Image (cartoon, rainbow, N blue to C red):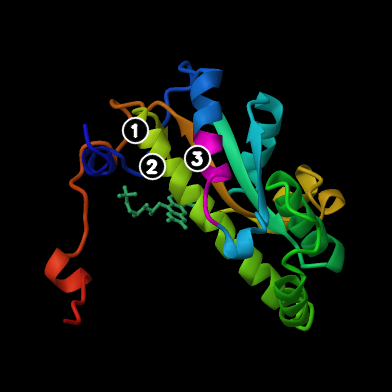
Amino acid sequence: MSLIDNLQWRYATKKYDSSLKVNETDVQKIVEAARLAPTSSGLQQFRVLVISNQTIKDKLVEVSFGQEIVKDCSHLLVFASWEKYTEDLIDNAADFSTDVRELPRGQFSSYTEKLKRVLLSQSIEENFSHTAKQAYIGMAMSIAQAAELKIDATPMEGFENDKVDEILDLKSKGLKSVLMLPIGYRDMENDWNANLKKVRIPMEEFAIEIK
Ligand SMILES: Cc1cc2nc3c(=O)[nH]c(=O)nc-3n(C[C@H](O)[C@H](O)[C@H](O)COP(=O)(O)O)c2cc1C
């Protein structure tokens, strides 16, 4: 099946079969897709927490407006981004990049310095808004990879970010939660959303051609 067919197959699953678990190889592939996502200036401003611990998933339901998909899923991925930019984070990313490419450190320092001037002059809110956007790109990649593996996934913004950050102790890592992605297998009989038609505006309306 093509990617498009698999994107037609997927839907925001509302009820997971809690007895079915995704195997670790497939979980790794879904996380790998996020790791391979492009990010602004290649800074990889987000991390993915991979949660299979039932006690923690149960706790997270309470701060996710009772959405049971958080506890019934096989694994819960939490996408969390840098709370703000710092000189160290940007320098470390630049050094990591030149090291991997076996180039001298500082090779791209004029770009890195320009980047620091822009990002470090912004407010913390502007910084987080930018780092959070990167997490959305990663999550989209994970959703597509999950669909390719015929694994269900539900993108989620419906949770209390501060409380999730506290439960997962994200502050100590310089991170803030952005998104959740429960993954697992749909409970066909009990998911009201399983057999509903996909709703998307027509292509003619969606794609605005400028020739
Ligand atoms: C950023 C984002 C946040 C979402 N948050 C939630 C959520 O908290 N709970 C939920 O059940 N669905 C959530 N959804 C699912 C959307 O409602 C769903 O993707 C949309 O209606 C399109 O339907 P489809 O994914 O089944 O094609 C979210 C989707 C996105 C992209």
Q: Which mark is residue 144?
A: 2
What residue sits 50% from the left and 34% below the top? 30
What residue sits 40% from the left and 26% below the top? 185
Q: Which residue is mark 3?
A: 33
Q: Distance of mark 3 from mark 1, alpha carbons?
A: 11 Å
Query: In the image, is residue 75 above or below residue 211?
Result: above
Quarter of the figure with the N terminus: top left
Q: Residue 63: percent from the left, percent from the top?
A: 65, 48
For residue 34, which quarter of the picture?
A: top right
Q: Residue 89: percent from the left, percent from the top?
A: 80, 60
Q: Are marks 3 and 1 in contact (CB under 8 Å)?
A: no
Q: Which residue is mark 1?
A: 148
Q: Distance of mark 1 from mark 2, alpha carbons?
A: 6 Å
Q: Is residue 73 visible?
A: no
Nearer to us of marks 3 and 2 is: 3
Q: Which mark is residue 103?
A: none
Q: Amino acid at mark 2?
A: Ala
Q: Which residues are magenta?
A: 30-38
What residue sits 21% from the left and 70% below the top? 206
